[in-house]
Image (tube, rainbow, N blue to C red):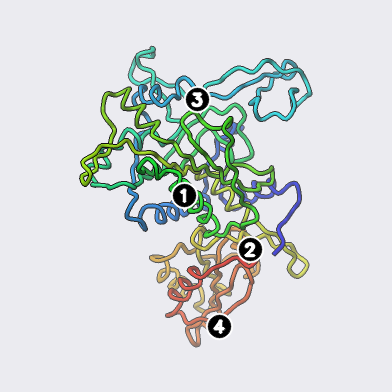
Amino acid sequence: MAKSKTPDLMEKIVSLCKRRGFIFQSSEIYGGLNSCWDYGPLGVELKRNVKAAWWNDVVRNREDIVGLDSSILMHPKVWEASGHVDSFSDPMVDCKSCKKRFRFDDLEENVCPNCGGELTEPRQFNMMFKTFMGPVEDDSSVVYMRPETAQGIFVNFLNVQASMRMKLPFGIAQIGKSFRNEITPGNFIFRTREFEQMEIEYFVEPGTDEQWYETWIKERFDWYLRYGVRAEKLRLEAHGEEDLAHYAKACTDIEYAFPFGWKELEGIANRTDYDLRQHTRSSGKRLEYFNDQTHEKVVPFVIEPSGGVDRAVLVFLVDAFDEETVRGETRVVLRLHPKLAPIKAAIFPLVKRDGMPEKARRIVETLQPHFAVFYDEGGSVGRRYRRMDEAGTPFGITVDSETLENDTVTVRDRDTMEQVRVKIAELREHLAERMEGWTRDDK
C-alpha cells in the first residue's frame, strides 16, 4: 500500500498515539513537561514487545551474549574515568533577541531559526544530570544520572566474565534507562531527556575488531528488516574522523528516513580497548581477559551496537502507519509486525445476544494464555475492525450465527481485510502460523 507523504505525518502519528493509548504527554493536566512522555496501555505493550524481540534475538538465541542490569546511580569516578565529566557536552548558543537556546551543530545557518536574530558565541554544555546522594547537598555527595548504559557493563566486565566463564569473543547486553539534559529535545519521542537504551558491548581479540565491526553492522541493519521496516527507509552512514567520539576507532549509524529527515536510529561503534583501560587506570583493577590456552592476558577491543528503545518504537510506528480509502472512507492502519503488535487478536461477538458474547468470552479465555487478545462488543463490527486497525491488531475474530452451529469463526486479516473460516479448536495454531510467516506486502 502507498504510504502517506503529507507533511503533517508526525501530527497524525502523535494524534493516533494519544487517541489509541500508545503515548501521552507527561504531566499533561499540568501543562506537560517538555520532552517527557508516558507510554499508555498499548504503548507499553509495544515497547515491551520491541525490547523482548531484541532480547530474544541478541541474548536468548545466542550462546555468546549474556545479560546485565546495572544500577542507574554509579560511583562518580566511573564518569570521570569514562571522560563524561570533562567531555560529555554539546555546543550551545542563545538567541540575543528571543532568548531561545539551540545546539550549535544542529543549525544550518548562524542565525536564530526561530526569529532570525543574532546568536551568542558557542559554549560547551555538559549534558549529565547531577544530583546528590545522602542528606547533605555538597560536592562530596554529588552523583550523576547515567547518560548511557555502557559504563555499567564495562565496570562489571570481570564479574560477568568470571561468573559465566565466558570465552572471547563474547558480549554483554543491557536494556535500561539513561538521562541526558539535551539542549534541544524534540520530534516527539525521537530525542528526549529520559530514554531507554538497548546496548551490547561485544568483547573481541585485538586484531579481529574490524571484522566484528562489519559483522555487527550487518546484523543490526538486518534486525530492523526482520521486523518489517522497509529497506528503502534505512541507510548506513559512516562517521568521518572529525565526527568520531573520543573513544571510537570507527562508527556507523543506521539511519531512518523520518518525516523530519534522515536521522540516527542506532549506532555501531568500535570503541577499541579505551574503556577497559580507562577504568583500569582509574580503579587500579586490571580489566583483562586471561586466555587459558595461550596463558596470555589481553585487554579486549569492544564493538558496541547501541540503539534507543524509544527511537525504535517511533520507527516501527512511522513505518507501519498507512492510510487508504475503503468504500469512500479513510482507513488508518498500523501494519506492525505481529510479534510487535500490542494486541495480537481481537474477538468480537457479531451481536450481544443468542449466546454469542458467551462464546466469544470462552475464545478469549482459550487464547489469553498464549496471545495478547482483546474483547470488544461495542458498536458495529466495521467500527470495531477500524479501531483494531488503528491499534495495529493483526487479526479480528468474529463469532456469528454460524459459529453457534459448527464452532467456526471468521478470522480477518488486518492488512488485506480478507476473511477465512477457521475452527475454534484450530485457532491457536492458525494464528501462530500466520504470525510467524508474516511479511509486508508493500516492502
9 left or right, relative to 391: right
**Tag 1's secondary structure?**
helix
Q: Amino acid at mark 3?
A: Phe
**Residue bearing the label numbered 1:** 216
- Labels 1 and 4: the sequence-earlier one: 1
* x, y percent for residue 137: 38, 14
Per the model, the C-alpha gap separating discs 2 and 3 is 39 Å
- What residue do we see at 60% from left, 22% from top? 91
Q: Amino acid at mark 4?
A: Ser
* x, y percent for residue 234: 61, 51
- Labels 2 and 3: the sequence-earlier one: 3
**Residue bearing the label numbered 2:** 443
Q: Name above or below for residue 182 compared with residue 203.
A: above
Tell us which disc is closer to us: 2 or 4. Answer: 2
**Residue bearing the label numbered 3:** 88
- Specify the quadrant that holds the C terminus: bottom right
**Tag 4's secondary structure?**
helix
Per the model, the C-alpha gap separating discs 4 and 3 is 65 Å
- What residue do we see at 62% from left, 35% from top? 186
Q: Name above or below for residue 28 compared with residue 394.
A: above
Residue 401 is marked as 4
Q: Amino acid at mark 1?
A: Trp
Between residues 264 and 433, which one lies in front from this camera angle?
A: 264
Q: Quadrant of residue 151?
A: top left
Between residues 384 and 440, which one lies in front from this camera angle?
A: 440
Q: Amino acid at mark 2?
A: Lys
- Labels 1 and 2: the sequence-earlier one: 1
* x, y percent for residue 350: 58, 74
Tell us which disc is closer to us: 4 or 3. Answer: 3
**Tag 2's secondary structure?**
loop
- Labels 2 and 4: the sequence-earlier one: 4
